[in-house]
Amino acid sequence: MSESSVLTNTTPDGITAARHHHPAPVLGTLGLFTVLLGGALPLVDFFIVNVALPTIDHDLAAGPALLELVVAGYGLAYAVLLVLGGRLGDMAGRRRLFLAGMAAFGLTSLACGLAPDAWTLVGARVAQGASAALMLPQVLATIQAATAGHRRARAMSLYGATAGLSMVAGQILGGVLVSAAPLSAVFGASAGWRSVFLVNVPVAAVGLLLAARSVPETRSERPAPVDVPGTLLLATALTALLAPLTEGRAAGWPLWTWLSLALFPFAAVAFWRVERRADARGRTPLVPPSLLRLDSLRRGLILVVPFSVGFGGFMFVIAVALQQGLRMGPATAGLSLAPMAAAFFAASLAGPRLVRRFGSRVVTAGGLIQAVGVTVLALTVWRGWPDLGLLGLLPGMAVAGLGQGLQLPVLFRIVLSDVPSERAGVGGGVMTTTQQASLALGVATLGTLFLGVAPGAGMRDALVMTLLVQLAAVVLTVLLSLRLPRTVG
C-alpha cells in the first residue's frame, strides 16, 4: 500500500490548509495469492472429509447419523454465518476479520484432528465452519475493494478457478492423506483421517504470516450495524431446510425432520419481509433487497444454485460409490478426480480470454460440454460396472471438468460485476452463502437419493440415477445461461 500524499488548499483569507489524500488500497500479487489461499481452505475442507468418513466411522464408531453431522455441522455453520461474516468485515475491517478467521480456522482444525470421540469431532467441525464463515467473505470483498479494471477481472477469474479446483482437490488430497497416514507414528490407525484436518494447521500459520505482510486493510466507508433480526431469521431458515435433509435419512425421518421442513417456508418469508421493511426504512439489512435488483447479481445467483447442487451432490456420491461400490482405496478414489481437476484448471486459464471474445456465452458452452461429460460418465458406469477403473472414468471426468471450468469462474465475475465496492462484503457474503447452501443441499438431496436407492437397486443403478439427476441440473443451467447479460464486467 502506498503512503498518503499531502495536498494544500488556499482559503479566501490566504490561509493554506493541508488535507490528506489517502489512495485506494492495492492488492498485490502476494496479497492476491494469500487471500486465494484463504478462499481455498474452507472449500477444501468441505470436501476433504468425504473420503475420510469410512475411517472415521471405523475409528470412532460414529454411525451414519453422526457421520452425516460431521459433514452437515460444518456446512450448516458455514452457510448460516457467511453473510454475517461479510457484514462484520465491512464494519471492523476485512483484513482484521481475515486474520481472525484464519487463526480460528487453524485452531479448530487442530481440535478436529485431536478429537477423542465422534461428538467432539462434530462440535469442532461446527466451530471450524464458523471460522471459515469469518474468513471467506473477506476474500471477495478485498478483491472488490482493492482491485479495478483488468486486474479485478483477472483476480475474479482466479478466484473462480481456485474455488472449483479446491472442491475437487479436497477429495484428491483427502484420499492421499488417508492412505499415506503421515502421522501414523503418533496416532496409529487413526492417523489417516486426523491428517486431513491437521494439515490445515501449518497452512493457516503460513497464511497468517503472509496476510500480515501483504493484505491491505479495507472497510466500508459507511458500515452498517449488524442486522440481528435478519441474521436470526436467515439462520433459522437455512437450518430448518438443511438439517432435516442431511440428517433425516440416517435418523429414520423422525417427527422433528418434518416439523423443521414445514418451518422453512415460514422462516424464509419472515426473513424476506423483515429485510424489505428494513430496506424501505433506510436501514441496511443483512441481505438488501435493493442489491438483488442488480440484474447481473440476480441472474448469476440463479445459475449458481443448480450448478452447486449438482456439483456438491456428485462429489459426495462419487466418493461413496468408488470406495464402497468398487472397493477402491481412498487414494485411488481421490485420484480418479485428477482428470476433472486438470481439465477445470486448463479451462479456467482460458476463460478470461474467451470471455473477452464471447461474453457470457462461455457459460452456455461450458454447460453443454459438462452435459456431454456427465452423459459419458453415466454410460461408462452403466456399461463398465463393476470392472471400472481410473482409465475408464477418465474421459467423462475430464470433459465434465472442462465444462465446469468454463462456467464457475465466469459466474462469479458476473454475480459481483455491478456490486459497488462499499457493499463488497455483503455481495460476497450473499454469493458464497448461496454457493455453500447449494453445495450442502446437493449433498443432502443427491446423497439421500443415492443412499436410499443403492440398497435395493445396487450401487451401479443408484450412481447412474444420481448422474441423470445431475444432468438435469446441468441442462437447467444451460437454459438459464441464455438469460445472462451478454457482456461480462
Image (tube, rainbow, N blue to C red):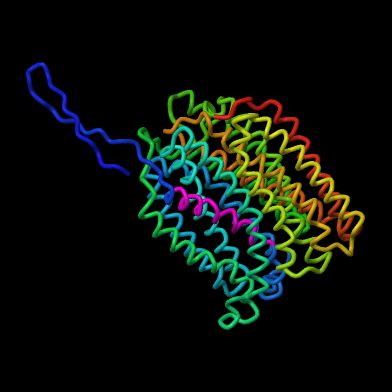
The residue nearer to you, when weighing 427 against 158, is: 158
- Where does residue 441 sit, x and y in percent of width and height? 69, 47
Q: Is residue 96 left or right of residue 251?
A: left
Q: Does the magenta stretch include residue 41?
A: yes
Q: In this view, does 346 lie to the left or right of 374?
A: left
> Is residue 85 among what the camera can see?
no
> Is residue 484 among what the camera can see?
yes
At 57% from the left edge and 43% from the top edge, which residue is drawn? 432
Magenta-tinted stretch: 32-50
At 82% from the left edge and 63% from the top edge, which residue is drawn? 389
Question: In the rendered image of this protein, does residue 396 appear above or below residue 301?
Answer: below
Q: Does the magenta stretch include residue 347?
A: no
Determine the main secondary structure of the stretch shown in magenta: helix
- Where does residue 146 sit, x and y in percent of width and height? 41, 39
| Res 90 quadrant in image | top left
At 72% from the left edge and 33% from the top edge, which residue is drawn? 364
Question: In the rendered image of this protein, does residue 151 appear above or below residue 313?
Answer: above
| Res 413 quadrant in image | top right
